Amino acid sequence: MTPSSSAASAGSRARKRGRPAWQALARMGLGKEVLVPALTLAVIVGLWELLVRAFQVPEFLLPAPSRIWADTVAMGPVVATHTLATMRTVLIGFAVSIAISLPLAVLITYSRFFEAAVYPLLILTQSIPKVAVAPILVVIFGANELPRVIVTFLVAFFPLVIAMSAGLLAVPKELLELARSCKASRMQEFYRIRLPYSVPFLMSGLKVAITLSVVGAVVGEFVAAEQGLGYLITSSTAFFRTPVAFGAMFILSILGIVLFQLVVIAEKVFFPWAIPDQKAQ
Amino acid sequence: MIRLSNVDLTYGQATEQATLALHDVNLDIRKNEILTIVGASGCGKSTLLRLIAGLLLPTRGEVLVNGQPVREPRRDTGIVFQAPTLVPWATILDNVLLPQRIVGRVSLELRERAQRLLRTAGLGEFTDRLPRQLSGGMQQRAAICRALVHNPDILLMDEPFGALDALTRETMTLELMRIWAEEPKTIVFVTHSITEAVLLGDRVVVMSPRPGVVREIVQVGLPRPRRFKMEADPEFVRCAERVRELIFTQEEHA
């Protein structure tokens, strides 16, 4: 019996005897994962509030958490519109990244010529700071959603290409020999072996890409936008409405976490076999 | 049944670093014989196996199966590698059926055969599990079932028990011989272990490296079924000694 399973059974025993629920939670390891960080966060926020009030820090420099909350809630509908706009850019950019990266990865791994032709260009796109590209794209495409989606794509697609090609190449040579020995065509080898084999790699690529998509969308919004949380931050700070800027920043981080978790859930639902399982060890 | 005549295999023939992996190999493998191959690393044992499977083609000479030259991978062979190489997304049963599924034909009959094979391999209760939920020995058993599912005439095994612990290894050796007794086939078995080679083989091919050549073929005159206690038999000792001698004197020759 592993230590964790014995701890879990001890936890269920504790609940049966009617001990406080938090004790059972703590024994199941939730204490370390949820309670401790939540408590740490609460302490930090409390200290922040206290210090800002004690030293009477000007609001436009560092607003108190209570003020951030109040101002952001007061602007509720406006903030919601901006959040939706950002989410739209993030999701479209993410979808475009997937749609382009996966076929690109397949071409790179299957064709030496294509690899030689395209790979250096990919590296080049990565060496260009995306913040520098954004204004140029705005000039070319105008101040609409397109340049923002392109910036999001540019920031997010590269890790996907790398992860996917690594996955396609990670298939053990023996498995490919097995496919050859039953006379599988290249298509059959691809669909039955290489593609499923790359799924765990693809999933970790998607986790990186969704996080980067949020970064990309905000970069795009900083440069030229009339809506979105990035725009909300630049416009609020321009008028020294710092609490709203802080609020937008926190919403962005929550957005990032939620989208990341959606990828994690999708992985659990569709590819449970791809998740490393500690209990099986 | 399988005949290799004057076979050479050179890797990277067109390049400057062409290496001769096998040189002038002549071998006659009889139907339903267990032929074991031993030799130091780099003597071309695995290459030989891949030639018989049709995964590699000889650069000189000929490989014949049932009188027909081997020019492409053959379906009537089963291959077992050192690592189980099961696919992580499929259950044990689906892994056993994988080669057939790749080419898109899984009949009910085949499914039943797979289930029967898994039961005989002691995996009857685990057909719905994922590979990672099974031990290394169990995974390798599933891999052997996978190689046997289409009832091939030829079973090629590339150090199949090399990654297992010593005890599992002995069990698996006995199990393989039991399977072979029930469903006789031609088995070519590559190993590093002299004991394994002598105990399993009707004949033991001793190879030496750089380039890979057949040094000698040792005939093992032990009755079947073979048992581990035969290791004390004078014939076993003679064969093992001879194989050892051949392997460890070849360095002086080189």
Image: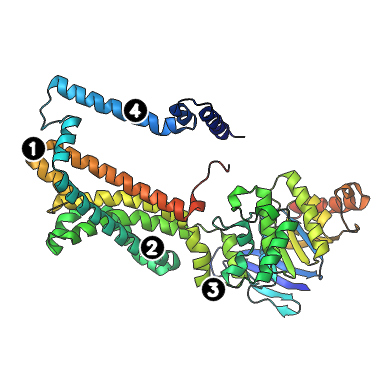
Colour scheme shown: rainbow
**Mark 4, secondary structure of its residue:** helix
Asked where in the image residue B114 lies, by quadrant, the reply is bottom right
Q: Which mark sits nearer the N-terminus, 1 or 3?
A: 3
Amino acid at pointer 1: Phe
Chain of the residue that carries numbered disc 4 in the rendered image: A
Task: Give a yes or no on whether discs 1 and 3 share a subunit.
Answer: yes
Of circles 1 and 3, the one toward us is 1
Please report, as a chain letter, where disc 1 is located.
A
Crowd class of label 4 (few under 14; some 14 to 19; many from 20; radius 10 Å): few
Task: Name the one closer to the observer, B179 or A154.
Answer: B179
Say which residue appears at 69% left-offset and 48% top-offset.
B164
Residue B195 at x, y = what percent? 81, 50
In the picture of the structure, the residue carrying the numbered disc 1 is: A240
Tags 1 and 2 touching, CB below 8 Å: no
Q: Which mark is residue A102?
A: 2
Comparing marks 1 and 2, which lies closer to the viewer?
1
Query: Of callouts 2 and 4, which one flags the residue occurring earlier in the amino acid sequence?
Result: 4
Vertical arrangement, residue B241 with respect to residue A281, above or below:
below
Crowding at dot 2, Cα within 10 Å, few <14 / some 14-19 / many 20+, comes out as: some
Which of the two discs, 3 and 4, labels the residue nearer the N terminus?
4
Label 3 CA crowd tier, 10 Å (few <14, some 14–19, many 20+):
few
**Separation of residues labelled 1 and 2 (CA atoms):** 44 Å
Going from N to C along the chain, the mark reached first, 1 or 4, is: 4
Question: Which residue is denoted by mark 4 in the rendering?
Answer: A39
Query: Badge 3 is on which residue?
Result: A185
Give SS at disc 2.
Answer: helix
Q: Amino acid at mark 4?
A: Leu
Q: Nearer the viewer, mark 2 or mark 4?
A: 4
Residue B49 in sight from this viewpoint: no
Q: Is label 3 on the same chain as label 4?
A: yes
